Amino acid sequence: MNANRDPQTTGPDVEWAVVESDIGRLLLAATGQGLVNVVFHADARTQRAAVEGLATRFGGTPVEAPGSTRLAEPIRQLAAYFAGELRTFTLDLDWTLASGFNREVLRELARGVPYGTVVGYGELASRVGQPGAAQAVGAAMGANPLPVVVPCHRVVESDGGIGGFGGGLETKRRLLALEGVLPEPLF
């Protein structure tokens, strides 16, 4: 816990909850600054690992808080997104888990690649003034602490390939189909 904060009056540093979605269980975590982490495939083992990672990074013990006011709007907006009713997230984000080049690339992705569009790894590298850093952009996508909300699923290979995805390629396909970039799977 941050020594400069009084947990009696400000609450825990990190609150988290697991929600169901069209792509499976997601662990959402938020701080007083905003949404800080979205974790795919949030089974018990994944939850434990995510919470331990948050505890290490922020100090203190993250609190499971499904009714948290910090998480209410992220939960609402994600539900609206999966229902096809939301195309742009308007959440406060806490960028603590990303730094340097990764943060720069992720911020550009969040602001510059809208719903229903895709961008190549190399093009995204050029947008942040690092042409030729396509592999570094791929690494930044793999380290994205806020997938779906910061849409790393919209980054594809320049030759038309789907590219990689931390949540698995089937999850990436489903997100791109939701946004109309790919056709819906037949089964």
Image (cartoon, helix red, strand yellow):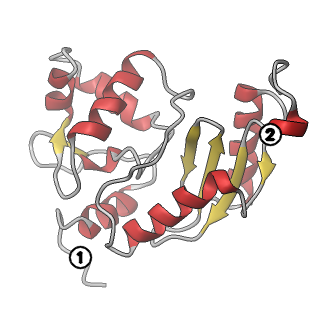
On the image, the x and y values in percent for residue 82 come to: 40, 70
Q: Residue at x 37, y 36 (%)?
A: 141
Q: Give residue 12's mark.
A: 2
Secondary element at tag 2? loop
Instruction: Decide if residue 22 is on the left or right side of residue 68.
Output: left
Q: Residue furthest left?
A: 159
Q: Residue at x 21, y 38 (%)?
A: 112
Residue type indicated by callout 1: Glu
Q: Residue at x 81, y 41 (%)?
A: 11
Secondary element at tag 1? loop
Q: Nearer the viewer, residue 147 or 83?
A: 83
Q: Do we see residue 41 in this rendering? A: no
Q: Earlier in the sequence, mark 1 or mark 2?
A: 2
Tally of numbered tags:
2
Q: Nearer the viewer, residue 67 or 41?
A: 67
- Asked whether the beta carbons under mark 1 and mark 2 sit within 8 Å of each other, the answer is no
On the image, the x and y values in percent for residue 161 come to: 17, 49
Quarter residue 126 falls in? top left
Up-down: is 153 above or below 186? Answer: above
Assign the C terminus to one quadrant of the image.
bottom left
Up-down: is 187 above or below 111? Answer: below
Label 2, residues with CA under 10 Å away: few <14, some 14-19, many ≥20: some
Residue type indicated by callout 2: Pro
Q: Do we see residue 134 in this rendering? A: yes
Quarter residue 139 falls in? top left
Label 1, residues with CA under 10 Å away: few <14, some 14-19, many ≥20: some
Up-down: is 64 above or below 186? Answer: above
On the image, the x and y values in percent for residue 115 come to: 23, 55
Q: Nearer the viewer, residue 161 or 70?
A: 70
Kindly identify which residue carries mark 1: 184
